[in-house]
Image (tube, rainbow, N blue to C red):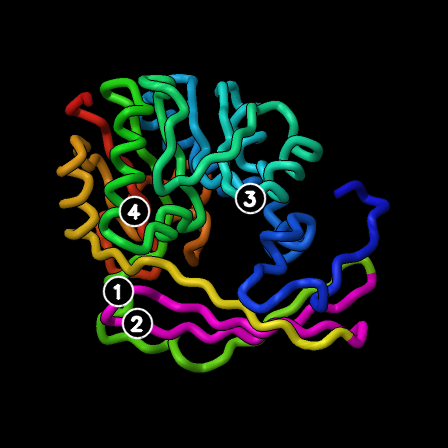
Amino acid sequence: MPPTEPLPSASSKAVDGNLLTDHPELYEARFPDPDGIAARWAEDTLRRYRAGARVLDLGCGTGRDAARLQAAGRRVVGADLSDAMLDHARSRHPGPAYTRADLRRFALGTRAFDAVVCLDSALLYCHTNDELDGLLDSCRHALEPGGLLIAELRNGAYFLGRTDLLDTPRADGFTWRGTSYRSHTTLSVDRTAQLLRRHRVWTTDDGAPPVTQRSAWRLLFPLELRRFLAAHGFTVLALYDGPGPRTEPRWQEGDVPGERTDADRLHLVARLTSAP
């Protein structure tokens, strides 16, 4: 959207839409990253494990991380399923090549990349085993032998016996272009489907009716993730809970990967050791 377009209203979105991802300006307002910490962590990881220059940012969203990786000297392709996100990325974060792709199964060239980066739990939109197999099989074909898969995601193991993030609505909000946006978000565990489900209600101070949205992430456990990766020819080089771009304390330049997998986030580095 160009800056002069009318402010998106919560009333414009139907139930089960996504106010933030359908309106990328709102996404960046709600999740500001002025210091580029997510991209800086990804670039540090790429350098630490000596990845080549060709990078696929899978689930690139608004494109700000892809553009920062490009500015660091990478040759980046940003891939996302959302046309709104891709339009925003091309206009606001130029540099990378952007393309529409479904991370659950994609074909963006054989051996076309030296690394695949998948941030902000995008990998967990693979809800089923078949979908996760599709993503990893696609990555396997897209990567050069020896290429890296780098991911940052929620840790399913955190919810074993812990309920501090569950079942109680959490309020949050921000203001954008004079309108106040408030959300009440409840997380719950669907043990049968092995999903972390999110129920969110948005309200604004412009008189629009509330909007309800629902989404979910796959709950993956560290050993389970290792097993999936091994089945697709990947060797895990690092799997740890922090520090990272969304941990407390947050990652800083010079931090080294940890050794535990107990906290809310996982950080994965895996190398393709068996070519397709």
| Residue under pointer 2 | 190
Residue bearing mark 1: 194
| Disc 2 secondary structure class | strand
Residue at (28% x, 25% y) in the render = 141
Disc 3 to disc 4, how far (Cα)? Answer: 18 Å
Quick one: which residue is furthest to the right in this view?
4
The amino acid pointed to by label 2 is: Asp
Residue 248 shows in the view: yes
Mark sitting earlier along the chain (1/4): 4
* Residue 74 in the image: above or below residue 99: above
Q: Quadrant of the C terminus?
A: top left
Single out the residue that lies furthest toward the bottom: 168
Which mark is first along the chain, 3 or 1? Answer: 3
Q: Earlier along the polypeptide chain: callout 3 or callout 4?
A: 3
> Which residue matches tag 4?
131
Q: Residue 82 got which mark?
A: 3
**112, above or below 149, in the image:** above
Specify the segment rendered in magenta. 178-207
Q: Is residue 121 left or right of residue 11?
A: left
Dot 2 or dot 3: first in sequence order is 3
In percent of width and height, residue 273 lies at: 17, 25
Amino acid carrying mark 4 in the image: Glu
Do the residues under discs 1 and 2 have CB atoms within 8 angstroms? yes
Per the model, the C-alpha gap separating discs 1 and 2 is: 6 Å
